[in-house]
Amino acid sequence: LMNVKEADIIGAVNKEKIPVTKSPCPMDKNTSREKVKQLLRGVYSDIPNSRQSILTAMTNKDQFKLWF
């Protein structure tokens, strides 16, 4: 799913009228995941093509070992 934009998922949900329930998690929208999401949103708006560059780096077989 890292190749799918959140806006595309929201669009598909709206188009197909898929019901969405509110998260019961008390930490909803106040997590490290949300902080990274906001950070990346800023990077994407400040640096052209950064989203594609990050995805390319993450899928580079020759550099894959750097993630482990």
Image: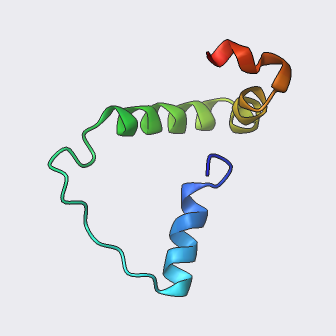
Give x and y (percent) for residue 64. 74, 21
Give x and y (percent) for residue 34. 37, 40
Q: Looking at this view, is 37 or 26 the one in front?
A: 26
Which residue: 56% across, 61% down?
7
Residue 61 in sight in this render: yes
Q: Residue pushed farthest right?
A: 62
Structure colour scheme: rainbow
Residue 48 in sight in this render: no
Q: Looking at this view, is 26 or 50 the one in front?
A: 26
- Indicate the quadrant where residue 59 lies: top right
- Indicate the quadrant where residue 12 lies: bottom right
Q: Quadrant of the C terminus?
A: top right
Direction from residue 35 to residue 31 in the image, left or right: left
Give x and y (percent) for residue 48. 73, 34
Which residue: 51% across, 68% down?
10
Which residue: 76% across, 30% down?
53
Which residue: 54% across, 57% down?
6
Where 2 falls versus 39 (above or below)?
below
Where 18 falls versus 50 (above or below)?
below
Give x and y (percent) for residue 33. 39, 37
- Indicate the quadrant where residue 35 lies: top left
Q: Number of callouts in the render?
A: 0
Direction from residue 32 to residue 13 in the image, left or right: right
Where 64 falls versus 39 (above or below)?
above
